[in-house]
Every structure is written in structure tokens, then in C-alpha cells.
Amino acid sequence: MPIKHFHLRLSKEHIAEDELRINEFMSTVKVTGNHAHLLTVGSTSYWSIIVFYEEENKAGANDASIEVKEIAPLTQQEQARYDALKNWRRAKASELAVADIIIAHNRELMDVARLTSPTKEMLLEVKGFSEKKWEKYGMDILDVVNSVV
């Protein structure tokens, strides 16, 4: 099973760049597991993240007939929910002293924002949203989504 190692630097000038790099990679593979440690070297803190993955379309990776899905832009209401979810994630990550990406990926938040009147079952169908994530953050996420009128 292949692995990929990332450093997620927590400084304001690097975190967005590192999150983008990780999100771009993770959107191209099927993640089968991960391992993360918060490290501090001198006064610099960062997450060391190992991602275990499988190629999404290993058999047909070079097949010209692979269909590429376009993602529809968010509606105004979905964008409001997405923005609220990102604000909640930022606050929760700050409270727990972890990087935003540890709470949820942008893609997960976007998929949740597209849900109308989400339920636990609907959240568990979102790619990357596990039972463990439901137990930790599920009710908070439902509250945030339902608070956006």
C-alpha cells in the first residue's frame, strides 16, 4: 500500500498552502488511513501526516475514456452554509489546538453544505465523514447547517 508524507506547517504564512497541497493530493486518491503527530522543533510547530492510500482508477488511469465530473458551483444558500461551516471548523480547531484540516476537509464541508435538512445518516454518506467524526462533531455540524436560514 503506498503512502505519502506531508508536513502541515501551522504558521499563518504556510498553513493555507500546505492544506491546499494535501487537499489536492487527497482528492485524487482513495485514502485508506492516516497517522498524524504534532511536532515542535524549536519554536516551530507542524503536523507530520502520513496518508495511506490507493489509486482511485489504478487499472484505467491512462484510459482516455475516464469521465471527469464537474462540480456545480454552490448556490447562494449552500455558500452561506459552507462559510458558516468553515467558521465553525476554524473555531473548533483553535479550541482543540489542531489544524483545520484535522477537523474536516474543505470538500467534506462543501458536500455537507449541499445537503438540505441533513441527518446523521446523510452526513455518514459524505465521503470522508466517518462514525468517529459523527461522534466528535456531528451534532455541532447539524446545528451550524440548520442555523443558516
Image: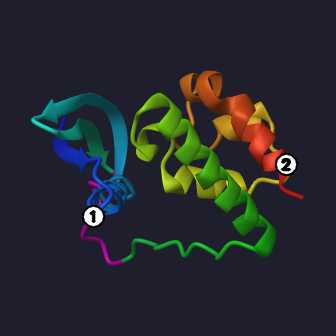
The answer to whether 146 appears left or right of 66 in the picture is right
- Quadrant, the N terminus: top left
Disc 2 from disc 1: Cα separation: 42 Å
Task: Specify the color scheme.
Answer: rainbow
- Quadrant position of residue 4: top left
Tell me the SS state at disc 1.
loop
Residue 145, position as x, y percentages in the image? 78, 48
Categorize mark 1 by other alpha carbons within 10 Å: few (<14), some (14-19), many (20+): few
- Quadrant, the C terminus: bottom right
Q: In the image as oriented, which residue stretches furthest toward the right?
A: 149
Magenta stretch encompasses residue 74:
no
Find the magenta span and give its range: 56-64
Residue wearing tag 2: 147
Residue wearing tag 1: 61
Q: Which amino acid does label 2 sit on?
A: Ser
Magenta stretch encompasses residue 63:
yes
